Image (cartoon, rainbow, N blue to C red):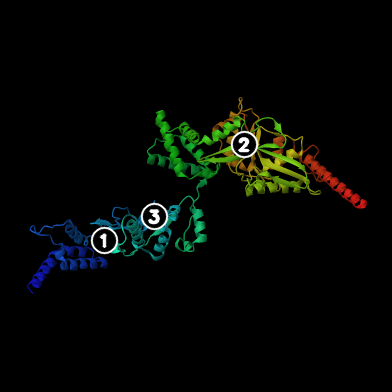
Amino acid sequence: MAREKSNEMNREGVRNAIEHLIAPLKETYAKFDDVLAHLDAIEVDLVKNFDRIKSPDDETPFPLAFLQQQQQLNLAQYQINLMVDNTDSTDGAPVVYEEHPYYHNLMGRIDYSSTLGQLITNFSLIKAGALHRANGGYLVLQARDLLMQPFSWEALKRALRSHKASIGANHNSTMKHNILMFHLIWQSTSDFSFDQYTFFEARAYRIGCESCTFGRSVALLDYMLQSYDPDFDELFKVQADFNEEMDRSDEACELYARMLATLGKTEETRPLDRDAVAAIIEQSARMQDAVGDQDKLSTHIRSCTNLLRESDYWAQVDGAEVIRGDHVLKALDLQVYRAARVRELIYEQIKRGTLMVDLEGERVGQVNGLSVMAAGTLAFGRPSRITATTRLVHGKVVDIEREVDLGGSIHSKGVMIISSLLASRYARDVPLSLSASLVFEQSYGMIEGDSASMAELCAVLSSLITDLPIRQDLAITGSVNQHGEAQPIGGATEKIEGFFDICNTSTQAGLSGHQGVLIPASNAKHLMLRPDIVQASKEGRFAIYTYENVNDAIHLLTGVDAGERGPDGTYPPDAVNYKVDQRLYEMASILKSFAEKSDEEEKEDSKGK
């Protein structure tokens, strides 16, 4: 009875002691019912359990460190775990960018502490995830990184659908698995029990944030998710596909110059002069993102930043106060030099004759085609010898690359278009009695694309007419359709630069003044050539020709006029098309005579029997 009265007096004393401490807090948070309820619960618990948290007398020391730690834990239950603090943020909703969106970074986690061999936890060890930090604002994620992390995508969808972020469910199962594996490997499991470990799941926190995923390939991922994930359109209602290039105009160039100035201040580089700004804008138009287009500029800021830093370094080496145009050009040249090992090996093989490419003279049924190869960040052009042979047989153009499974479907499509064009243009009234074989000489890998179909067609026409050789100091690129029209191709700039470098270095005399490249007229707007090629072209040492159709191409390659079909359906004498037409008629006649002779022999054999 006396003890109960003593305890009641102690509780009353504790209540009086803490009442005046809690009262100001209740006034401050009077508008928040949850906070007031929490303060009331603390007050009741302090009065009820004051014996567990009171300081010990000097005469009753704790014999074990565990008891001291237990007292600290008893006091810790009244602390606040401030999971998210936005007091230092600027005005407006929080914007959180999560670089590594694996499950616990996204949804939060529960940490553990070890005490006398046991893993224990409590509410103060709950850590917020990106969803909690972005509550009321925006969460920005890299789409590719998010989809590569196990459980993250499904967890994000659940949170957005329910507007709740739960901490602990997946975490507890992972912890139990890890603990069990530890005992299986290092300890006996005969007396193992999860009772010696503390697990709990935190209350699901309500969230209200907008999730934004982005990335350089986010458009493709969007299309895939729309097709394969039925929840995607429901949870991500606004999809935007940002372009990686912009139109090149006076206004755009001015804005680009301002952006470069801003990047310079951010990176603490020297200012750029007019020539340096112009050089970087020119390089932006050359970048692969913009597909080498005179009318476009790349918006890939990282490439501009890297070029700006490197140009600033060479300005520093030069002792200049500003970045000049020659510093930018030197940085660009060295970028190419560092990545050009494969290119130089191929060019060396061509120069030494290991890879056979003729750069002078004339050949029948042989033409220099151009292709683009990529080695890391560097794309470069290289010439390839394309040869064609023709013979008398029922009409068919054989793609040797396809026959040995080294030709892709697009390349084979281009060869089939050549066969169709030959039949429709030259064999309207007679059967196409031509069989042709096409091959990329010394190619030991996959051939794909139709950018060599015009070169292949010219090689077939040259092989068909034995007195129609093709100039070997010219190279040609371009696609052809069934009507003989030239179609644009990619990598025109790289192809021209590659053939220029081969011509300039593979002979002792260098450029002869007769060498050049043929490209479709529709590719002229895509050319962003190096200054040395532009200068060589102005001086007449290297030529760049444009053509509209196969007639223009064969005329440039052979020097002989192709000729147009007249009202009477015939071509002018001595024209290329006239010779082709006559040769195919001769082949059809020969094939017909063989067929008639075979029929007569069969009849005579039948009469003899």
Give 426 or 401, whichever is nearer the viewer: 401
Whether residues under marks 1 and 2 lie with C-beta atoms below 8 angstroms apart, the answer is: no
Q: Residues within 10 Å of mark 3 (few under 14, many from 20)?
A: some
Name the residue carrying label 1.
Answer: 122
Above or below 125: residue 273: above
| Cα–Cα gap, marks 1 and 2 | 70 Å
Q: Are marks 1 and 3 in contact (CB under 8 Å)?
A: no
- Count of all numbered marks drawn on residues in the image: 3
Q: Which residue is mark 3?
A: 102
The image quadrant of residue 292 is top right
What is the distance, in whole Å, between disc 3 and disc 2 at their CAs?
47 Å
Residue 51 position (above or below residue 484):
below
Q: Earlier in the sequence, mark 1 or mark 3?
A: 3
Secondary structure under tag 2 reads strand
Q: Position of residue 378 (x, y in %)?
A: 52, 39
Quarter in which the N terminus is drawn = bottom left
Read off the residue under disc 2: 383
Q: Nearer the viewer, residue 551 or 410?
A: 410
Q: Looking at numbered disc 2 in the image, what kind of residue is underneath it?
A: Pro
Sequence-first tag of 3 and 2: 3
x, y (%) of residue 506?
60, 29
Q: Residues within 10 Å of mark 1 (few under 14, many from 20)?
A: some
Amino acid found under the numbered disc labelled 3: Tyr
Q: Amino acid at mark 1?
A: Asn
In the rendered structure, the answer to whether residue 404 lies left or right of residue 191 reads: right
* Secondary structure type for disc 1: loop
Q: Residue at x 56, y 40 (%)?
A: 373
Q: Is residue 420 left or right of residue 319?
A: right
For this orientation, the residue located farthest to the right is 607
Q: Quadrant of residue 550?
A: top right
Of pointers 1 and 2, the one earlier in the residue sequence? 1
| Whole-number angstrom distance, CA of label 1 to CA of label 3 | 23 Å
